Image (cartoon, rainbow, N blue to C red):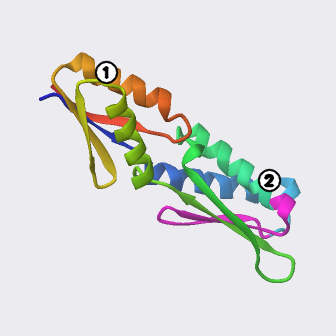
Amino acid sequence: MPSFDIVSEVDKQEVKNAVEQTNKEVSTRFDFKGSDARVEQAEYALTVFADDEFKLDQVQEVLNNKLIKRSIDIKCLDFGKVEKVTGNKVKRTVTVKTGVEIELAKKIVKEIKDSKLKVQASIQGDTVRVTGGKRDLLQEAIALVRKQVADFPLQFQNFRD
């Protein structure tokens, strides 16, 4: 039976490259001269450091631009609250979300079932597998999911006939 998987993945190497480019640009910019502005990465958790909230927002903007240039959708970023570190220095934790969360997976399955398409959707870990009798039905399901879920980056992979 034809099938495909709905996933949400982010290339870790591209995130690492974007962080390195951000740190390089921040270190050479005149408005950050002498400041402790940087981005640190631990797997899919990024920590943005700066001297004050204004500079923190500037570093975050540079990071967002670098991620976009490396074709990473910034809708997958989960921004934490601004925390005071020492003195007047601040930091913010940014989490890169990967995988389809269980609530979103349930919503996708419900939308597919409510659409009355002759396809079956099942949750398998952090992916949603959709199977159907014909390829055209699967393409309709992809179009439906793209229309319904616009606020989270999804990829459609493993398309099998």
- Mark 2 or 1: in front is 1
- For badge 2, the amino acid type reads Gln
Residue at 83% of width from left, 68% of height from top? 35
Q: Nearer the viewer, residue 130 or 72?
A: 130
Describe residue 140's horizontal placement relative to residue 104 as left or right.
left
Q: Quadrant of residue 161?
A: top left
Can I make out residue 101 in this image?
A: no
Q: Secondary structure at mark 1?
A: helix
Q: Which residue is mark 1?
A: 139
Q: Element under label 2?
A: helix
Range covered by the magenta-colored residues? 36-55
Q: Quadrant of the N terminus?
A: top left
- For disc 2, the marked residue is 58
Q: Amino acid at mark 1?
A: Gln
Say which quarter of the image contains residue 27: bottom right
Residue most toward the bottom? 86
